[in-house]
Amino acid sequence: MYKTLIVDDREIFIIELKRLNVWGETSGFTVADKANNGSQALDLLRKNRYDLVITDIRMPIVDGLQLLRIIKKENLCPCVVLISEHSEFNYAREGIVLGAFDYLVKPVTEASLLELLLRSEEYLKANYSTSRINLPSDKKFEWAYPSVDEKNIINYIKSKDISAIKLFKVTLENLYTALSDNIISADIIAKKLYHNIIIATYEEYPWLSNFIDMQYFEEVDYFHDSNANSFIEFYLRKLNYLIKSILKLQPETSDNNINDICKYILNNPEADLKLKIISEKFYMNNTYLSNSFANKTGIHFNDYITLIKMSRAEYLLKNSNLKTYEVGYQIGYRDINYFMKQFKKVFGKSPSEYRNTKYCDYQI
C-alpha cells in the first residue's frame, strides 16, 4: 500500500476525505497520517516516509505552496497533490510549476479522487524506477504530449545547438493553444516536458552537477501572475542559461584530445590541474598543449582552469557551509588572498559578498 499524508487546517475536510470509498484495495493507497498545517506536516515528513501528500493550499503557519517548496528542496516525498478552491486557480498553477503532481478542486468527489490516486500510482511506479518523469496514461491527453519535440530538443542540447530554445518555445506555445480549454493539463505537460529535458541534459553532461545544482532548474524564482506566458518565459530563461553554461564550461572543438582533457577537468574540478600535470597525464608536451588548447578552444589553458575552479567555488559557496578559506583550500588554493582575488575577477564580488547576497543567480 502507498502511504498518504493528508494536510488541511479544517478537520472536517480530512474526515470527509478519509470517508470516501477509495482507500485500501480500491486504489492501493492508505491514509497513514494527517496534519492540520504545513509545520505539523513537515515534522511528520522528516520522521516518516510517505508516498503521497495531499495538501490544502491555504493554511496557517506554513501554507501549501511553502510546504511544497520545502518537500521538493529536502526530497521529503515523491508525489504532492494540491487541493484548492476555484478562486485559488493561479496558486494551483504555480504549484504545478513548483513540482506538484496535480491538483484537486474542492469539494473533492469520490470519482475525482480515485482517478487522481490511480494516476498517482502510475507516476510513483515510474518515479521509483527512474528519475525521468513519464506522463501518466490519461488517454484524453496523450495526443497532446510532444514526445517527438522532446527528443528533438534533447538532441539539439546534446549538440550544443541553441536552436533548442526556439523549438522549446514553439512546442510550449502549441501546447497551450491545443489545451486552451484545460490550462492546468497544459501546465502539467509543460512541466514534465521541461523536467525530462533537464534530466536528459544532466545524463548527457554528468559533470554539470559539479557546477550547478539540478534543483536550481526546478526552483521558481519569480512572482508573476500565473499565466501561460510567464511560465513559458520562466522555462525558456532556465533552459537558455543551461545551454549557455554548457557552451562556456565545455569549449567547442573538433580535437578529440582537447575534448578529453576538458571532460577530465570538468569531472575533477578540485584536482591539481596545473598544465604540467595535465600534460603528463595525457602524454603531451607542455608547450604543445598550451598552444594547442588556445588555438582549438579560443581560451588560454590557465584562464580555462581559473574559470572551472571559480565555477566550482561558486557552487560550494551556494551549496555548502564551508568557510571562504575552506572553499579555497578545497579547490586547490593555499593562498586565500589570491583565491579571493581570482573569484572577484570572475564574478565581480568577493566570496563573502557573493554568499551574503540575498539572492544571486548563477553567474557562469
Image: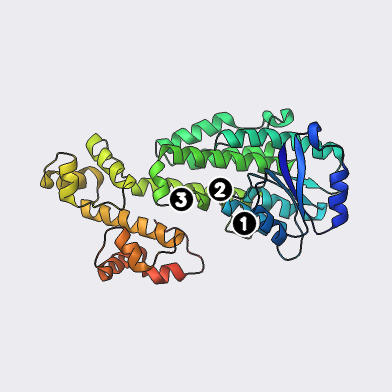
Tag shown at residue 70: 1
Mark yes or no: residue 152 visible.
yes
| First in sequence: mark 3 vs mark 2 | 2
Mark 1 touching mark 3, by CB under 8 A? no
Taking the spot 24% from the left edge, 40% from the top edge, the residue there is 258
Amino acid of disc 2? Tyr
Q: Dot 2 corresponds to which residue? A: 235
Q: What element carries label 3?
A: helix
* Image position, residue 242 (x, y; %): 45, 47
Q: Which of marks 1 and 2 is in front?
A: 1
Q: Determine whether, in the image, residue 35 is placed left or right of residue 327.
A: right
Earlier-in-chain disc, 1 versus 2:
1
Give, as a three-letter code, the residue at label 3. Answer: Tyr
- Choose the circle earlier in sequence order: 1 or 3: 1
Residue 225 showing in the rendered view: no
Provide the residue designation for mark 3: 241
The one nearer the camera, 24 or 203, is 24
